[in-house]
Image (cartoon, rainbow, N blue to C red):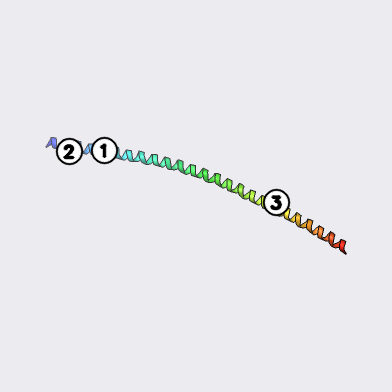
Amino acid sequence: MKEMVGALRDELERRSIGEQDRLQQALATSSEEINQLRKMIASLREEMERRNIEYGEKCQAIERTARDEAKQLHEMIWSLRDKLEYYGKKES
């Protein structure tokens, strides 16, 4: 009987140790995966910020080009009006 109890106790201890080993392995794997995900998040955040900066710079360049073009068109309109007025006065 004592041998049987001892054998059962040994078996329970082996199982308990095996469970603890599997739990520790699962925790280590989870921890590693969490660290990889955190690194990926940081990388994606940096990429998103870089793209936002690029997008802002492109928008500013487009706005600047549009302002320059509008200014050139206004100057052309003023020039043509001046010519029309000049030729209109000349014909009168």
Three-letter amino acid code at disc 2? Answer: Leu
Query: Is 34 or 8 nearer to us in this picture?
Result: 34
| Residue 68 numbered mark, or none | 3
Question: What is the secondary structure assignment of the residue under circle 2?
Answer: helix
Residue at 14 percent across and 37 percent down: it is 4
| Residue 78 numbered mark, or none | none
Which badge, 3 or 2, comes first in the chain's sequence? 2
Question: What is the secondary structure assignment of the residue under circle 1?
Answer: helix
Which badge, 2 or 1, comes first in the chain's sequence? 2
Q: Is residue 92 placed above or below 54 in the rendered structure? A: below
Residue 39 in picture, x, y percent from top left: 46, 40
Which badge, 1 or 3, comes first in the chain's sequence? 1
Tell which tag, 1 or 3, sits nearer the viewer.
3
Residue 48 in picture, x, y percent from top left: 52, 46
Q: Tell me the quarter of the image containing the C terminus.
A: bottom right
Residue 2 in picture, x, y percent from top left: 13, 35
Tell which tag, 3 or 2, sits nearer the viewer.
3
Q: Residues within 10 Å of mark 2 (few under 14, many from 20)?
A: few
Q: Which residue is mark 2?
A: 8
Three-letter amino acid code at disc 3? Answer: Asp
How far apart are the alpha carbons under marks 1 and 3? Answer: 75 Å
Side of 18 relative to 81 (left or right): left
Q: Is residue 6 placed above or below 44 in the rendered structure? A: above
